Amino acid sequence: MVTPEARSTTAAGGLELGGCEAGALVARYGTPLYVFDEGLIREKCRAYRAAFESRYPQVDVAYAGKAFLCLAMARLVAEEGLHLDVASAGELHTAVTAGVPPARLVMHGNNKSPVELAMALDSGVGRIVVDNLPELGLLGGLVARRPGRRPQEILIRVAPGVDPHTHRRIRTGQGDTKFGLSLAAGQAMEAVLQAVGTPHLLFTGLHAHVGSNLRDARAQVQALETILDFAVQVREETGLTLENLNLGGGLGIRYLPRDEIMPLEDFAEAITTALLEGLARRHLPLPRLMLEPGRAIVGEAGVTLYSVGTVKEVPIDEPPGTRLYAAIDGGMSDNPRPQLYDAAYTAFLANRLGEPADTEVRVAGKHCETDILIQSVALPRPRAGDILAVPSTGAYTYSMASNYNRFPRPAAVFVGNGQARLVVRRETLDDIIRQDVLAPAES
Ligand code: LLP
C-alpha cells in the first residue's frame, strides 16, 4: 500500500504492494511497470457506490474507462456492480469482449462516427449520451434501419456554462466547449424536442460533466442548479420529467502530500443534498442519479515502478550551482501528464526505503525531449539500478501512453493478497514494427 506520503514494507524491508515485494515484481515483469492494487480499486468502487447509494434512492455508478481500461479492469468493475462509460469503438470493444453486460454500458463521444454508433446499437449498449444535433439525426436514422429493435435509450449532454476551476485542458462544463449542447443558447432544448419527436429513440435524461480532478463538489452543485432549471423547462415544453440525471465524473485524487481533496463522503453529501433540495424546490420527481468517476476509482491504486539509469550533476546558474538529474527508463510515453497538464508527482526509491531522503533530485524521462517527470523530489542520492516508485499513477497514464521514440508500452499488473497477475503484457520490439508495411506502391 502506497500513498503520496506513506508506504508499507515487507518483512524483509522492501516496498510492499498488495502483499507483493516491489523488487520481486520488477524481477518478474521488468520496468517501467504499472502496478495496481486490485483490493484498493475494489474498495474505491464499493466506497463510491456506498457513498451515493446510502444518500439517494436510485444510483448507477459507471466507471469512466478512459482513466484506465483493459479486459481485466472492465471485468473487475462489472464484478463490482458498476456500469461502464465507454467513449470510443476501442473502449466499447474492450468492454464487450470482457463480458460487461451491454445494458450497463454508457456510450460517450463528441464526434461518434456512424460506425461507432452502429456498433453501440448492435452491441446493445444501455444508454447513448448524445452530444450534438447531427449525432441525433444520425442515430435516429440508424435506429430506423433496424426494424424490430427496442427503442434506444439516450441522454442529452448539456454544457451548463460552469467554470470548474481546474487545469484549462480538463475543463468541460464552461460555455465555450466542444462538449455537449448549450443550455443558454437553446441548443439543448432543440435537441430534447428533436429527440422526443424521433421514433425509436427514448429520451430519458440529461448528462453533464463539468471537469476533471476537482477538489470539491462546487462545480457539480452549481451545474446542478442550471440543469434542474432546464428540467423544469423540459417538463413545461414536453410534459416529460427526467428519468436519469448523469453528473459525470470529476472528483480529484491526492498526487502530493499537500493535496487536499474533499473526502468522498462529503462530496456525495454535497451533491445528493443539493439534488434533493433542488428537486423539491421545483416539485420535480427524483430521477435516477448517474455518476461516472474515473480518476477517483483507479488513480490512487496505481504505482509506476521505473529503473534509474543515468545520474548526472549538471551545473546551473542559481545556487547551489548544480542540479542532480536522475533519468528513468520511461517518461512521457508512459505518463504524458507532466507535459500536458504540468502534473506534479512525488516519488521514492523502493529499494532504499530506510535511507534518508536528503538529496534534491530532478527526475527525467529518456525521450528525445525535455520530458521531466518530476521537477524536484527529495530522495536518497540515487544510483543506477535503483527502483523509483511514483504513487498515484493509476489514472490517465497507461490509457494515454504512446510509442513515442518507438518505446514499447509497459506492462500492467494487478496485485493483491501476495499474488500478482499480468493484466497488460509489455509490448515487444516486434510489436513496434507490427503495423509497418514494406511493400511496393499500390496502383
Ligand atoms: N465522464 C465524462 C463524460 C468524461 O469526459 C470524463 C473525463 C469522466 C467521466 C471521468 O472523469 P474523472 O472522474 O476521471 O475526472 N487526461 C486528463 C483527464 C481527462 C478527463 C476527461 N474526461 C488527466 O490526465 O488529467
Image (cartoon, helix red, strand yellow):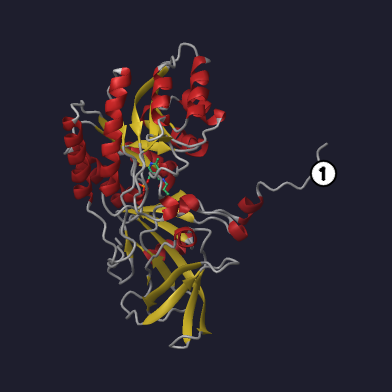
Label 1 sits on residue: 440
Residue 359, image quadrant: bottom left
Looking at the picture, how far across and down is residue 86, in whole percent?
Answer: 43, 37
114 is higher (above) or lower (below) than 397: above
In the image, 390 versus 236, the foreground residue is: 236
51 is higher (above) or lower (below) than 83: below
197 is higher (above) or lower (below) than 313: above
Looking at the picture, how far across and down is residue 382, in whole percent?
Answer: 43, 78
Quarter of the picture holding the C terminus: top right
What residue is rendered at 62% in x and 56% in y? Answer: 429
Q: Does the beta carbon of the residue at mark 1 sit less than 8 Å from ligand 1?
A: no
- Res. 101 visible in picture: no
Residue 207, image quadrant: top left
Judging from the image, what secondary structure is the residue with disc 1 in? loop
Looking at the picture, how far across and down is residue 243, in whole percent?
Answer: 28, 25
Say whether residue 153 is left or right of residue 141.
Answer: left
Quarter of the picture holding the N terminus: bottom left
What residue is rendered at 49% in x and 62% in y? Answer: 339
- Res. 137 visible in picture: yes
What residue is rendered at 36% in x and 59% in y? Answer: 392
Which amino acid lies under the numbered mark 1 shown in the image of this protein? Pro
Outermost residue toward the top?
Answer: 148
Looking at the picture, how far across and down is residue 368, in whole percent?
Answer: 60, 67
In the image, 388 versus 92, the foreground residue is: 92
What residue is rendered at 52% in x and 20% in y? Answer: 142
Say whether residue 79 is left or right of residue 108.
Answer: left
Say whether residue 410 is left or right of residue 357.
Answer: right
